[in-house]
Image (cartoon, rainbow, N blue to C red):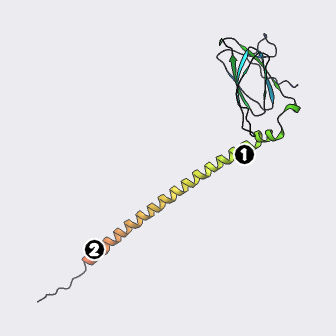
Amino acid sequence: MKHTTLPAWPGQTPAAPGAWRLVPGRAMSLMAGEGAVLKAVEGGLWVTLSMPAVGPANDSGDFFLLSGQSLSVPAGAHVVMEPWARDGRGDAHFDWHALPVAHMAPVSVRWQVGVRQPLTDLRAGLAAVGAAVAGLVTGLAGGLVGFAADLIALTARILGFRALMAVSNAPKAQSRIS
């Protein structure tokens, strides 16, 4: 079994060598780059597992691990955990081990998480950009058409007023009806 070494931080403790400590009121968020096993070494853990929906079933949700219990975490999953005890007090110690290749998610799941889902998100984003650009072009075109119509109406009013003035200033025949 391959062991993933997390960088040193103040949560490491000699009370449970090789384990990490979470204190009450604190939470930790981890993103599984590869399949892993989360094990509660000492105390209890409240774990929320979030991952992309793959296939008909989705194992996302909340899990409560007591000392000695483990949870398999698939590649691409997001894990949020905090200490959990019935009395609300007490530290929790956990360990995080990478899964051996034989236990890793199938290639189809890794493809879904690593390539297909981001590609789907990109397509949706580009579609939204396309719709925004189309709306902008439509708005600009409508504005230009409206401006052109206003300009034509103004020109017609000016030309119509000049034509009316030309007719009214024309010499009039003086005739008498007897």
Quadrant for residue 93, please give it. Answer: top right
Q: Residue at x 61, y 49 (%)?
A: 129
Q: Nearer the viewer, residue 76 or 143?
A: 76
Q: Are marks 1 and 2 in contact (CB under 8 Å)?
A: no
- Label 1 sits on residue: 119
**Element marked by disc 1:** helix
Residue mark closest to the camera, 1 vs 2: 1
Pinpoint residue 16: horizontal percent, then vertical percent. Answer: 79, 12
60, above or below 56, in the image: above
Pinpoint residue 109: horizontal percent, then vertical percent. Answer: 79, 39
Quadrant for residue 22, please give it. Answer: top right
Residue 5: mark in rendering: none
168, above or below 100, in the image: below
For the C terminus, the image quarter is bottom left
The residues bearing labels 1 and 2 have C-alpha atoms spaced at a distance of 68 Å
For the N terminus, the image quarter is top right
The furthest residue to the bottom: 178
| Within-10-Å neighbours for mark 2: few <14, some 14–19, many 20+ | few
Q: Nearer the viewer, residue 12 or 92?
A: 92
Quadrant for residue 104, please give it. Answer: top right
**Element marked by disc 2:** helix
Q: Residue at x 65, y 46 (%)?
A: 125
The furthest residue to the left: 178
The furthest residue to the top: 15
Pinpoint residue 152: horizontal percent, then vertical percent. Answer: 41, 67
| Within-10-Å neighbours for mark 1: few <14, some 14–19, many 20+ | few
- Label 2 sits on residue: 165
The furthest residue to the front: 56
Q: Looking at the picture, which amino acid does disc 1 mark?
A: Leu
Q: Nearer the viewer, residue 16 or 67?
A: 67
Q: Looking at the picture, which amino acid does disc 2 mark?
A: Met
